[in-house]
Image (cartoon, coloured by chain):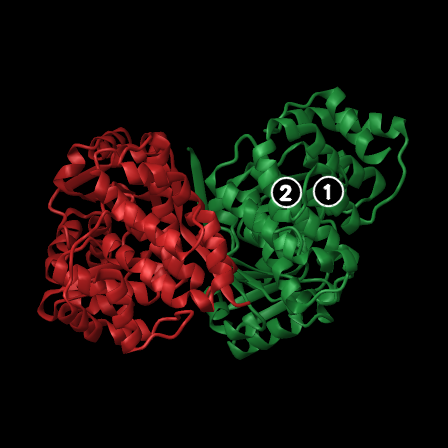
Chain colours: A green, B red
């Protein structure tokens, strides 16, 4: 069995964990550039960070202009501002987009390179240390060394990263900051984490690490299922979803995705579905396609999720996403053309070709 | 839920993983002090390291005088030899004793302090980076920042460590190096890892990390049960036991032990039981004592281990340890006196006092 297991980001979870670990901020740096966006002034996170930085005597500069879908072309100004301020650490407070921007700024502040060179994944100077404070139970970006940026001219999203240089040093998970999240966004994010769990667990490259992390994601998801269906969450359920998002980040660090992720992109690009919803609407149909080739593991997964079979699994996901839009065959044929090469290149438990991709789309969306 | 999750040691597992990752050695240092013991010349590990270090142009010095139960008083010479050689990295090849010696030498090579000051857990100079190559599926020391040393004058074992300074940078897990292990040692070590799994999972301080790691340990243990009972292992079973040992190290990093560990020490000290056997012989009796206070989690654990109840669990452990020595009441009363304070201080799911400790010993060993 070949595997690696590594978590260089220290995850610290708990109510008020930022305030309770104030000393870790001054251990990380003396001048902080804080990147966030306006909504974080309402969920308590920016206030907490301000309190801690002042208490620790750390000079800081805050920008609340972190972009929603960060573009490569927007990144230079964050790196420049951090460098001009003399920052020796970057703090990102927000969803995956903000955390990705923070990681990018950390590279650019230490390296005067054209942003396009970010994709070399090697940098002369060590990026500044990054502390991540997620305010969505979203992408797991707080524990990954990757940033996903949109390259506008090509209309694509492309990620870069370096495990040794770009892993955040700390991820503080305080579910208080996620309490203002709209219920359907929380639900879509939870399905995103589940999708990473499934794709890592059922991959032909799966190993004992992905088995362990996948099973934990499934168990946690099951515990939150009624809340996700009803859109009403206890604090502990919010914590569990936040923890599951971090686990999905750990899964991303160790495993590639499957066809589901590749096939989800056209839905996000053309129909503006959230990433979690775009993957989620395809999951049931994908499971039906692959089930025969991975039935033993799929059954263990279904048991952990509290469903009987693929039909029950599909119904579970539908009851959480509540997504009912209609698609035309010509649309799905277009998406098939756009995604089948990437989908086929993934370590799917059953090989997919163009015909299979179209079939999965049709069963899911027609 | 308060928790932390952190694995700063990169675990790399696979057949020939040392040879396949030769570049990581030269990335870590240019002059290596290698600590091992004679048996490692027979299991292939020292040969592999020699090949890699030569191939990478790394100067190195090997000592095969790593002690079996390292004593504080023996440590200075390892630190001095490393410093005199001008080592910039330490490589430990062996069981937990060797790996603990390697971590200690890394501190002493960089800090000219009396060995007693190791227990301050803070050192002026950063210890040398340590690479660990376990050749037993034993203590999990390859992923912990701790060293356990015997203080001869006091006749105690005492650990020191610092998560930021002493975590090994790499742990290479190649089960080929464990193929020469006697079957009963492999079995005792497997029970040691299981015991850490159980004690972390059932602790009143347990959290979602220890739940995840514990369940993985139980599942892996179950897969290896017939092999452990028969003393005949496939390569994959050896790998799974090696992985479980690393998981138990991760559990140690995140969770304290319970009364079982405290109560096992007198058995090791006075009766020379291996650490795994000393904990293992107490597990069934301890489970019987605590079951009523943690029945839901205990049942989930039993299910993962493939047993029905506490009786089935006790039988399972006995069938693996094959330990049948007799004890007298006066001995057990002595051990109770020695261990009950430490045992009572642990986060046990049911409180233990002196009477309870004696009762657990008696049920296990009379």
| Circles 2 and 1 on the same subunit | yes
Q: Is residue B350 above or below residue B237?
A: below
Q: Residue at x 67, y 57 (%)?
A: A224
Foreground residue among A79 and B64: B64
The quadrant of the image that shows the N terminus of chain A is top left
Disc 2: which residue: A302
**Badge 2 element:** helix
Q: Residue at x 78, y 35 (%)?
A: A266
Q: Chain of mark 2?
A: A
**Badge 1 element:** helix
The quadrant of the image that shows the C terminus of chain A is top right
In x, y percent, where is residue B107?
24, 58
Disc 1: which residue: A312
First in sequence: mark 2 vs mark 1? 2
In x, y percent, where is residue A178?
69, 64
In x, y percent, where is residue A50?
61, 74
Q: Chain of mark 1?
A: A
In x, y percent, where is residue A35?
65, 61
Please state if B325 lies on the left or on the right of B241 as rendered. Answer: left
Please state if A171 lies on the left or on the right of B298 as rendered. Answer: right
Foreground residue among B111 and A260: A260
Total number of numbered labels? 2
Residue A176 occupies which quadrant of the picture?
A: bottom right
In this orientation, does residue A287 appear?
A: yes
Q: Which label number is shown at residue A27?
A: none
Q: Residue at x 21, y 63 (%)?
A: B265
Q: Residue at x 33, y 42 (%)?
A: B242
Give how far apart the Cα atoms at labels 2 and 1 are.
9 Å
Residue count near mark 2 (Cα–Cα under 10 Å), binned few <14, some 14–19, many ≥20: some
């Amino acid at each position: 069995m070949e595997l690696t297991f590594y978590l260089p980001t220290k995850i610290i979870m708990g109510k008020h964990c930022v305030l309770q670990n104030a000393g870790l901020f001054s251990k990380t740096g003396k001048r902080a550039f804080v990147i966030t966006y306006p909504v974080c002034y309402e969920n308590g996170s920016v206030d907490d960070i301000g309190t801690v930085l002042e208490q620790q005597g750390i000079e800081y500069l805050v920008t609340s202009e972190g972009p929603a879908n960060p573009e490569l072309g927007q990144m230079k100004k964050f790196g420049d501002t951090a460098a001009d301020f003399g920052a020796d650490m970057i703090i990102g407070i927000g969803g995956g987009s903000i955390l990705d921007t923070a990681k990018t700024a950390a590279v650019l502040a230490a390296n005067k390179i054209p942003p396009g060179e970010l994709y070399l994944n090697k940098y002369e100077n060590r990026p500044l240390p990054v502390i991540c404070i997620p305010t969505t139970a979203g992408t797991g970006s707080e524990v990954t060394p990757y940033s996903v940026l949109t390259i506008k001219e090509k209309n694509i999203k492309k990620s870069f990263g370096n495990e040794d240089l770009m892993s955040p040093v700390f991820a503080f998970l305080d579910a208080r900051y996620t309490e203002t999240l709209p219920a359907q966004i929380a639900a879509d994010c939870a399905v995103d984490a589940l999708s990473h769990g499934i794709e890592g667990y059922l991959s032909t490259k799966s190993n004992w690490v992905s088995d362990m992390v996948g099973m934990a994601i499934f168990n946690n998801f099951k515990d939150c299922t009624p809340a996700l269906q009803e859109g009403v969450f206890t604090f502990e359920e919010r914590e569990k979803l936040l923890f599951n998002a971090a686990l999905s980040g750990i899964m991303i660090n160790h495993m590639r995705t499957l066809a589901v992720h590749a096939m989800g992109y056209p839905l996000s690009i053309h129909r503006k579905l959230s990433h979690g919803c775009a993957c989620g609407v395809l999951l049931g149909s994908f499971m039906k396609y692959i089930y025969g080739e991975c039935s033993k593991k799929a059954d263990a997964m279904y048991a952990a999720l509290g469903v009987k079979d693929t039909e029950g699994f599909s119904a579970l996901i539908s009851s959480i996403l509540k997504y009912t839009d209609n698609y035309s065959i010509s649309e799905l044929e277009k998406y098939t053309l756009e995604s089948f090469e990437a989908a086929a290149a993934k370590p799917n438990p059953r090989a997919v070709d163009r015909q299979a991709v179209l079939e999965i789309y049709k069963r899911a969306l027609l």
